[in-house]
Amino acid sequence: MLQVEHIAKTFGERQVLEDVNLQVNQGDVVVILGPSGSGKTTFLRCLNHLEKADSGRLTLAGKTYDLAKLSKKDILEIRQKTAFVFQHYNLFANKTALENILEGLIVARKVPKEEALKRAESALEKVGLLAYKDYYPSQLSG
């Protein structure tokens, strides 16, 4: 379960997030919908400390974090348990689909190579791209 309580964020004088709360149970699918500039991306960036929240709590996998006072260890723990797909994402053009996935698992998450390979191939299979694992981004569309 993921629970977010009382997140607030300001940029200068502008209050972007005020007392935002959310609970997501395992297996839930959630859409955060709103007009451009309403704080959707800022909210998500505050959850994994790409943006520092002014206040709020995050409970993830049974552990509660004060988002305004995260240690480097806390940030690492949160990032190891979450994923963030950027609106404008980039792939390594010189790496295959499989290698792009392995890069994040091995380098960022420190997953052993054999385990990372299993997980990467499983992820590709789930989205119907296992047959394209050796293709480069320029060879894939959409």
Image: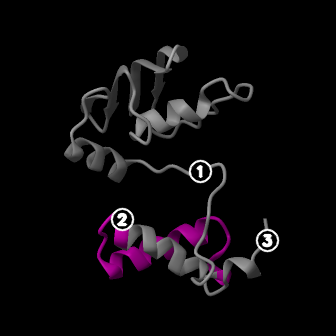
Quote the CA–CA distance across marks 1 and 2: 16 Å
Name the magenta segment's main secondary structure: helix
Q: Are marks 1 and 2 in contact (CB under 8 Å)?
A: no
Q: Secondary structure at mark 3?
A: loop
Q: Position of residue 40 (x, y in %)?
A: 60, 30
Q: Nearer the viewer, residue 52 or 26?
A: 52
Residue 62 — which label? none
Going by the numbered disc 1, the residue's amino acid type is Phe
Compared with 75, 109 (above or below) is: below
Total number of numbered labels? 3
Q: Position of residue 105 (x, y in %)?
A: 40, 68
Question: Mark 1 sits on what residue?
Answer: 86
Q: Residues within 10 Å of mark 1 (few under 14, many from 20)?
A: few
Q: Residue furthest right?
A: 141
Q: Is residue 130 magenta?
A: yes
Q: Nearer the viewer, residue 54 or 76?
A: 54
Quote the CA–CA distance across marks 3 and 1: 17 Å
- For image coordinates 23% across by 45% down, the residue present is 72
Between disc 3 and disc 1, the foreground one is 1
Q: Which residues are magenta?
A: 107-132
Q: Residues within 10 Å of mark 3 (few under 14, many from 20)?
A: few
- For image coordinates 69% across by 28% down, the residue present is 33
* Image quarter of the N terminus: top left
Compared with 31, 135 (above or below) is: below
Question: Mark 3 sits on what residue?
Answer: 141
Question: Mark 2 sits on what residue?
Answer: 108
Going by the numbered disc 3, the residue's amino acid type is Ser
Q: Secondary structure at mark 2?
A: helix
- For image coordinates 48% across by 38% down, the residue present is 45
Sooner in the amino-acid sequence: mark 1 or mark 2: 1
